[in-house]
Structure formats: C-alpha cells, structure tokens
Image (spheres, coloured by chain):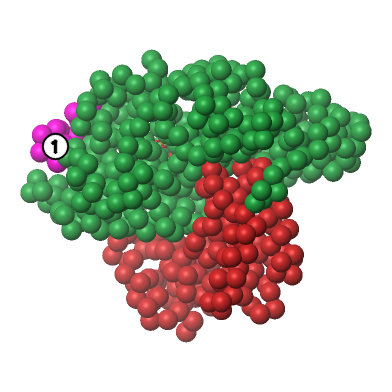
Amino acid sequence: MELKVLFKYTDDPDQYKMDTYISHGGYKAWEKVLKEIKPDEVIEIVKQSGVRGRGGAGFPAGVKWGFVPKDSPKPKYLVCNGDESEPGTCKDRVLMENDPHRVVEGMAISSYAIGAHHAFIYIRGEFVFPAERMRGAIEEAYEKGFLGKDILGTGYDLEMTVHTGGGAYICGEETALLNSLEGKPGMSRIRPPFPAIEGLYASPTVVNNVETLANVPEIINRGADWYAGMGTEKSKGTRIFCLSGHVKKPGNYELELGTPLRHLIYDLGGGILDDKELKAVIPGGSSTPVLTPDQIDVPMDFESVAEIGSMLGSCGVIVMHEDTCMVWAATRLAYFYMHESCGKCTPCRMGTQWMYQILSRIESGEGRPEDMDHLLSACDNIEGQTLCPLGDAAAMPVRSFAKTFREEFEYHIEHKKCMVQNSFPSFGQ
Amino acid sequence: MILNDETVKKIKATVPIYPQRRSCILPALTLAYWQEGHLNDDIYREISDILDLKTVDVASAASFYTMFPKAPVGKYYIQVCHNISCALLGADSLIDYLAQKLGVKLGETTEDGLFTVVTVECLGSCTTAPVMQINNDYYENLTREKVDQILEDLRKQG
Ligand SMILES: Cc1cc2nc3c(=O)[nH]c(=O)nc-3n(C[C@H](O)[C@H](O)[C@H](O)COP(=O)(O)O)c2cc1C
Ligand code: FES
C-alpha cells in the first residue's frame, strides 16, 4: 500500500525552503539529537528501527554506523550517495529536489552518530538542478546555525559539502565513489579494507544512500518502534519504487515494504500500456534478474524477491509488455554495462564486450547455434571473477534473460528474426 | 588563458573546502566545462596551475568522465537517453527524429554550430521517459510537439 513517510511533503512546491521544512517539523530531530541523545544512543535507535540501505544491497544502516572505530585518531567522514546511476532508478532525485533539507538533516544526524565533522553528498554530474537545491539547503542550514561551528551552542562542528560527478555509472559503487571524490578516476577499490575502516582519504567513512539517510529524522522524531512497525519482519519501513516502462501511470510511489508487485503495476500504475499483456518485469534496477507475469504476486521486500531468484535492489521497476523482444532488451542492457566497464580488470572489460557482441549478433539475425552456450559461459566467467561488483551487475541480467526467455533467443538464432517484433509507442503518442 | 576570471575564482574557492587538493579536480573540470562547453589539454594545464597539481592527474581524471566532451560541440549539447526505460517508450524514434530534423548524424554538429546530438546512458529520470538533457537542463516526457517547441525556442535564443 502507498504510505507516505518520505513523500509526505514532496508535492509541496515550497518544501525545499527552510521555513517550510521547519513548519513541517524539520530540524526538530537534529536539535533533539544534539541536545539530548548521545552518539551511541543514536546508533542504537537506528539499529532498532531496522532501516536497511536503500542503495541496493540492503545492509542495516545502524550496524554499518557501528563499524566505525571510536578510538581511531583519524578524522571520520560521512558520504551520502546521490549518484543514482542504476538504470530504472530515479527516486533520490525527487528527495534532493523537493525535500533537500530532509537529506541535510539525515546527513547531519548520521555524522553526529559516527563522530564525523565533515559530510559530503556525491551527486551525479547530470543532476545540476538537484545539486543546486542541495547547495541551497546546505547554505540555509549554515545561516540558521544548523551546520558550521559550535552548532546550536553544543560545541559540535559539522561542515557539509556537495560534490558532483562526471557521468560514470560505476561511481555509484561506494569505493569508486570515494576515489572519484578524491579526484581520481572513479575505479573501484579492492575490499577489504571496507570504507568504515579506510574510506575517504584513508579515514573511517560511512557511505549511505540518499533515501536511507532521509529516513533518519523521522526515526528520531517518532521512534524506532514506530519505524519498525512498518513493512515486514526483516524489511522495515517504506521504499520508493520507480515504476517505468510500459505502464499507464509511470512514477515514483512510496510503498510499505512487502506490498505486492501486482498492486504497484496494476492498481497504482494503472496496468499495462494499451491494455497489452505483461511480459517481463525487472524489479530492482537494471542489474537485477528479470521476473515473469506468474511471479508478480511477490511481496516487494528484500527476502521475498530474493526467494524467487531476483533482488529488490534499488527498487527500479521496469515493465515490458508483450511486444518487447527479450533479445533486444538483453542487448540494450549489455551495451550499457560494456559502455560503463572501467576496463581495469580483464573479465569485466572483455566479458562485457563478449556478451554484447554475441547478443547483438543474435539480435541482428546472425546468431550461431553455439552462441547460447557461449553467452552463458561468458556470464560464468564474469560473475564472481571481477574486482568490483559491476561484473556481477552486468552478468546477472543477461543470464536471467537468456535463461528465462531461452526459446526466444533460440528462435532468433534459428529463424534469423524476432519471434515478437518490437512495437513501442513512437515517442509522443 | 582560456578560463575566465570568474571560473578561476570559483575554482580557487573550492580549495579550502576539501582536506586534500586533488578533490578539487572534478569541481574544477565541471566549472571549466560550464564555461567552455568542452575540455582539452590546455584547460587541464590551466587547472593544474591554478590548483598546483600535476597536469597528468587532472588529465587522467578528465579522460575517465564521459560527461565532459573532449572536443568542441554545438552551443546546445543534446544528450538523449537510450537506456532501457526510455527505449521502451520510443527513445530510438526520438533520436531518429532529432537527427533527421537537425540534419545531422549522432555526434555531429549542425552547420550553424548550434546543436550536437549524442546518446547517453540512463539520466536518472526513467519515470518521465523519454528524456534528454540539453546542457544543464532536463527535458522529460518528450513528445514530437515538445521537441519541435524546444528546438524552436533554442534557435530563437541563438
Ligand atoms: C555497480 C554499482 C552501482 C551502484 N550505484 C549506486 C547508486 O547509484 N546509488 C547508491 O546509493 N548506491 C549504489 N550502489 C551501492 C553502493 O555501493 C553502496 O552499497 C550504497 O551506497 C550504500 O548505501 P546504503 O547502505 O544506504 O544502501 C552501487 C553498487 C554497485 C555495485
Ligand atoms: S532509462 Fe532513460 S532516464 Fe533512465
């Protein structure tokens, strides 16, 4: 069901301004934390709430904060991940644009909890307007004394900086993001060490997604129990689902975790475009394995989606109707991952090229009988073999399309043409 | 000097923000791109002088980031998303339409120097597909009429 926690005020055109945010209860949590709650207790509350990372992997936020060593002599950093680069995902943008102070407040509370005195928000370079809104909010927060030196007379100092990227998918991956923030090419680092121990400038760093941190102020205001009362046993709270593709009413919908995918597609999304039949759904951003119509009663929570072999990921739900060629879809995704592979490690650089070459051959009707085996073996040689998770992200969707819709791929190879001719709305109709 | 006083001033202002100087590279590249519309070796040299960093560090960062064109482009740099959600809603026909209307191939610039059309990967605006970015602005839920209007308005601005 729709349940608006993060989206409660995002339709208010003035919500991005300090006064409006305050009139809606903004910065109360920040004040309360600074004056009444110890950093350790903040971490405990966030742990109790059960809120898990919204960037993709779903790691419990409070637990991650608890990994930051307290005795380290190095400065600590908070980095908010606003790279929003997983195809199908466009939720953090709404928060940054329409409710930037909520993000600032969440970042501030998290910084305080881990003992950081400098927080960064890394925003993809294309998001010029969201970055402008975030800068504006941070500026207002400094003016009000919510950021800077000796905040509200408590002795706590916090600087906050917007940093924008340069157009690279991999910079959404946290270690690549940190390299990028350090001014280097955005290539991933080998883990361990994990960022909580050695992150930005080799100092302890927490990286959290925009949506994860935006939940924090309300968790403080209304308590861990309130938050933990939403969602399922292991997937607490709400998530913003980005519904795109062949639906009548695409959009960002905030739903309680555990809401069936069918409800999102058919009730909120108004069903399939032109009343065609549903054919395939990618549930959690382009790297997550594709689902078929018989699977859409799945409750959208981390565990249930994993049980049927896919992932909740970034909640980018991409819907495809009956007139969509699955070979075409897989080829389009494979092209993306080839384009975004940084080239540092061979299995990813070569593997993504092979996948794309084989797929485009099959798509254009020049596929060979052995191509399916080659394609799947390319997936095997990428998955688990690459330095960073981009390889897995590339192989997972290709394998799932090839396995789930194998007969369509084989038809392409055998008959040198599509089983279903792509028929999409020409733009503007 | 390619970078003007305003840009140089803004680049210098990033220095006290970061614990390490090298972090200023991406902000500097962004500011230079906003001024010039593209980047090149001379710009990397100027940035490295301003920031007192090695030119190779600036250049290697720049070469990694695809958002910055490395050669001059049209005054209006049209970047059309051709990733999955946009493609499902007709991005390919949008690209064809733009190319045909402007009389250019992908990557080419119109003779009057006004427009360059390229394809880009997901712009993070999938629920309002099809989408394109022109310089710093997003244009969403595109229709034929909207595209015609946008091009006409930009032409008028010159
Ligand atoms: C290839 C790749 C791309 C990613 N892109 C993003 C992204 O755009 N935004 C994001 O928040 N996390 C992204 N992540 C996940 C981050 O690495 C990291 O797990 C996350 O920012 C942690 O925050 P969270 O615990 O709040 O989710 C990506 C991961 C991978 C492997
Ligand atoms: S696929 Fe085009 S904006 Fe995401």
**Which chain shows up in red?**
B
Q: Quadrant of the N terminus of chain A?
A: top left
Counting the numbered discs, the total is: 1
x then y, percent, for residue B62? 53, 63
Q: What secondary structure predominates along the stretch shown in magenta?
A: helix
Whether residue A401 appears in magenta in the rendering, the answer is no
x then y, percent, for residue A10? 35, 43
Q: Is residue B3 visible?
A: yes
Left or right of residue A332: residue A189: left
Whether residue A32 appears in magenta in the rendering, the answer is yes
Q: Tell me: residue A228, above or below residue B136.
A: above
To which chain does the residue with label 1 belong? A
x then y, percent, for residue B27? 42, 63
Would you identify the image quadrant in which residue A377 lies?
top right
Among all residues in the image, which is located at the extreme bottom?
B1
Q: Residue at x 26, y 33 (%)?
A: A218
Left or right of residue A355: residue A37: left
Q: Which residues are magenta?
A: A31-45
Q: Tell me: residue A328, above or below residue A60.
A: below
Q: Amino acid at mark 1?
A: Lys
Q: Tell me: residue A272, above or below residue B109.
A: above
Would you identify the image quadrant in which residue A419 lies?
top right
x then y, percent, for residue A391? 62, 38
Q: Is residue A56 visible?
A: no
Q: Observer-nearest residue: A301 or B51?
A: A301
Q: Residue at x 38, y 20 (%)?
A: A231
- The residue tagged 1 is A32
Q: Tell me: residue A27, above or below residue A414.
A: below
Left or right of residue A164: residue A394: right
Q: Residue at x 55, y 63 (%)?
A: B134
Query: In the rendered picture, chain A carries what hue?
Result: green
Q: Secondary structure at mark 1?
A: helix
